Image: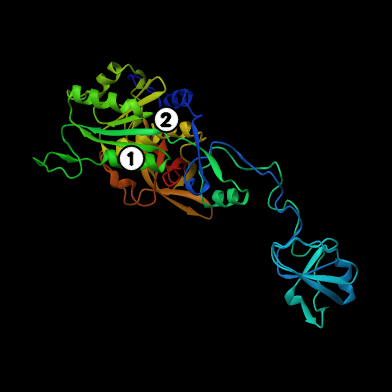
Amino acid sequence: MSITGTDFISFAESQNILAGLHVNSHRYERVPLSDSLGRVLAEDIVAEFNDPQFPTASMDGYAVRYEDLQKGELVVLGDNPAGHDETRVLAAGESIKTFTGSMMPKGSDTLIQIENVTYKDGKILINELVEKGNAVRPVGEGYSAGEVLIKKGTKIGFAQIGVMAGLNQVMVKVALRPRVAVIATGNEILDLGENAENPAQIRSSNNYTLAALFEQSGAEVVQLGTAPDERDAIMKTFENALESADILVSTGGVSVGDYDFVKEIIPRLGAEIVYKGVGIKPGRHILVAQRGDKFIVALPGFAYSSTVTAILYVLPLIAKMLGKKTPYKTVAAKLQEDFKKRSPFTEFTACNVVVEDGEYFVNFYGKKVGSSAILTNLLDESALMIAGEDDKFLEAGTFVNVILLDTFA
C-alpha cells in the first residue's frame, strides 16, 4: 500500500530516486599513509608479492629436516637471526638455530621449538617430536601476489594502516571529503553563546548535531551557524555556501508556515527540486534539490526530525561521493515488546538494540513518546527501528529492520 490522498511520495520511492541521482564520486587525492586514518580508499589495495615470500619460522627453535628427527640427535651449524640472508643448505643430521620471522634454511622443512630439545656440546637432543612443517609459515600464508587485500570504498582503520605499511604503501589514494555546509534557520533559534531575549527562544542544536554526524560519516563540514527567517538573508547565505560546498543542508523553513521561506528560496537559486514531501515520520516535509553537481537538502526544524532525515537523505549522498556502497548498516532484529505505529507513514522510532548469542533484539525501555523534538532518545545504545506503511501493530517476537547508529563511517 502506498501513501494516498497526499502529495507525499513513499519512503521506498524517495530512496530509489536518491540512489539514482548522478554524484561525482571520482575525486581523490594522495596523502601520506600516516595521514590516511579515517579516510576512504579510492582504489583497491592489491598485493604485489606473496606474504611471506619464503618459508618463515613462526617460533624460536631449530630448523631441521623432518626425516632427521628420528635420529634423536642433530648437529647445530650456528644461528640464523631474523633479517639474515641465510644461504646454508641443511644436509642430513644437521640443524640451524632459527628465530621467529627468520627465513627457513634451504633443505629444512620443519622447525622444532626450543622447549622440545636440549642443547649440549654443539648438538641438540630431541626430547619431544613435532609434526612435519611445524612452526613454518608457508609462502603466501598471509596473502598471495595479485590478491585484493582492501577494497575501494573502505574506511581506513588501524588494520588497514598496518597492512598497507607492510606493502610499503607510502602514499594512499583516498576519496576527497565532500564539503557539507550546515545552517539552522528560524527567528526563534539562538546560536551557542548568544543571550536569550525571551524564554520562547530556542538554543540551536541542529547545526552542531548534523555537523558532527556528517564529519563522523567522512565529510568536511562548513558550519554556517544560524540565520533568521528573512528571505534575502537566507538567499545570500545559501548562494555563498553553494560556491564551495557540495551539499547544503538546512534545518527549518520547509513546512507550511508563514515564515517557512526555505522552500521558496531554493528554486530561485536555480536548483531543481527532486522531491518535496515524503511519507515518513518524522520529517515528511523534507526537500531534496540539485543544482549541477551540488545538492540542497532542506530538513525539518525539530531536533529528532532533522537528525533522522539527515541520516536517511544526506548520509547516502556523502557515501556516494566517497565511493562507499552503503551509508549505514541495517540489521534484522526481534521485538522484545509490542509496538503500535502512530501514523500511516513509514516510521523511524528510536529504540534500544541488544545482542544476545549473536541475535539482535529491540526494546523501547526509557524512550519517551512525544513530539519530534526529543533528541535525547538517541543517547546511549540507540538505533532506529523501521516500521513500514502497512504496519500497524507489531507483536513481540516480530522481526523488524533496524538502522544501527554506531556504524557510520
Secondary element at image label 1: helix
- Going 56% across and 46% down the picture, which residue do you hit? 170
Residue 352 in percent (x, y) is at 39, 49
Neighbours of disc 2 within 10 Å: few (<14), some (14-19), many (20+): few
Q: Amino acid at mark 1?
A: Ala
Secondary element at image label 2: loop
Q: Amino acid at mark 2?
A: Asp
Residue 160 in percent (x, y) is at 56, 48
Q: Nearest the camera: 7 or 199?
A: 199
- 207 lies left or right of 200: right
Dot placed on the residue nearer the N-terminal end, 2 or 1: 1
Q: CA distance from mark 2 to mark 1?
A: 34 Å
- Front tag of 2 and 1: 1
Residue 286: in sight, yes or no?
A: no
Task: Name the residue tied to disc 2.
Answer: 390
Residue 325 in percent (x, y) is at 52, 35
Q: Quadrant of residue 222?
A: top left
- The image shows residue 244, relative to residue 291, as above or below, that is below
